[in-house]
Amino acid sequence: MKITRPVIYLVLIATVIVSVFALSYYAGLSSTKPSSASTVLGKNETGRGWTTLNLSNDTIQSNNPQMAAYGSNVYVAWQACSDDCEIYFRASNDGGKSFGSVINLSNSTGHSTQPQIVASGNNVYAIWRDNKPGDYQVFFRASKNNGATFEPVIILSGNGTGAADYPQIIASGSGVYVSWYDNPAHPHLLLRPSADNGTSFGAPTDLNKQVGPDLRIEFGGSPQIAAHGSNVYFAWNSEYDIQLKVSRDYGVSFGDVVQVSNNIFTGWRAIVPKMVADENNLYFTWVQRRVQHNGETDKVFFTTSNDEGKTFSNLIELQGYPNVVPVGNNIYLTWTNTVDNKSTIILKLSLDRGKTFINETTKIVLNERAISQGIAVSGNHIYIEWTQPVPDPRLGQMFFIAPSQLFLTESADYGASFGEIVALSNGTQAIGSRNILASENRVYTVWGEGLPSFGKNAVNTEVIFRSK
């Protein structure tokens, strides 16, 4: 199985064979503008090959869906809130065409939030934060039968130092690795490994204990973990740099800190790291922002390591907030440029594991502002989705709660061209967190839909799933 990772669990990719034929598609590559007419799929309709399901189908606030897939098995977890919040789960064993019954994973008297899930073989692993012990701690449950049933809860954090935050989980083979950010007053980055599919866990490793007190989690720059084979990678942003530690023994011990960004600009801070592992390769992006921010445009960089994080290539400067998808020797990079409230989604391709990128780019030109975008790859098919705000004078310009629409476009020729734009969601509702991934020639997307509100007149939000 390819490694799964939830800060970025935006993709799970089927392997594609890179050939000269694939390169030929890019010989005449140019800007692409899909049809301006969108095909709208209703909330509970099936159209143009898409299957649509309301997974929550309740009368409370269901949002923050997380998704994982392995083979034809697809898993979705989300949080649902009324007075308190619970973590719910559903599994599909037929490529997303149907789902089993809802399972309450947390079933807690506390407040359960921030679910994360990963899958490996027949195993599904879920974590979340729960304040049942008092402070928020990291809870874990494992299923060994494709999500049909789950083992009892294991509380992984709670060593007396304070609350746990930013939980992350990955799986590789029989290895399961969970990390979190502990005690914000005196921050520590902790990781616990399991070598037996989550049946038991080793003692926590304090990953920044020897680094110093200047570790900061800011601007969304949460810790990143990845794994392949016996290697476990852990990255974070300190005050100025992106730091990396590598374990060669399944997370039992870690080596010295590697400076990935290496403080390349005096007076600039490296933030928002993203890390993806694939075989012996590591791929990083991050943002450089001035410490004394005076309106200057952020700088965005990409680098790769082809020797398990020992050395890194020269930096490649990008724009926007990119996504990285490795597929065999191919590396797909996407980001969004916005000028005068009109966005263009950029796709670039490397055929040599990120050492170089071909000069041509594919551009998806939009007439509106794109808030965020994601990408999934399966074979020669590339799927790019994004959200656009829908103006509503009642809510002003607060795009995080204003109505928004979820769109998707598909390429069947390795990204050389894209087809029509499909509007997936109900444009009268706000799109919460969303995920897209591909597995075994199928694509899955899930999101929270509704206008979040509270109190006795709260409007319910729902978890909507589409597959093709």
Image (spheres, grey):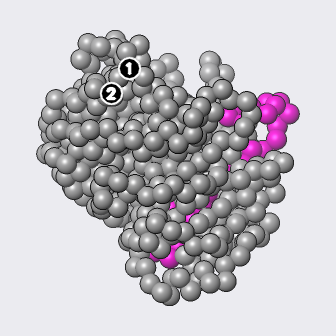
Q: Residues at badges 2 and 1 in contact (C-beta under 8 Å)?
A: no
For residue 460, above or below residue 281: above
Residue 90 x %, y %? 39, 46
- Look at the numbered disc 2 and give the secondary structure of its residue: loop
Q: Amino acid at mark 2?
A: Val
Say if residue 254 shows up in the picture. yes
Residue 385 lies within the magenta run: yes
Mark 2 and mark 1: Cα distance apart in space: 7 Å
Q: Which residue corresponds to the image point at 44% horizontal and 72% vertical from the top-left?
A: 352
Residue behind mark 1 = 213
Report the disc number at residue 69.
none
**Picture quadrant where residue 402 is located:** top right
Q: Which residue corresponds to the image point at 66% horizontal and 69% vertical from the top-left?
A: 362
For residue 53, above or below residue 252: below
Residue 16 x %, y %? 41, 75
Residue 327 x %, y %? 42, 68
For residue 88, above or below residue 279: above
Residue behind mark 2 = 211
- Give, as a single range, the part of the protein colored magenta: 376-401
Q: Which residue corresponds to the image point at 53% horizontal and 42% vertical from the top-left?
A: 264
Say if residue 53 shows up in the picture. no
Q: Amino acid at mark 1?
A: Pro
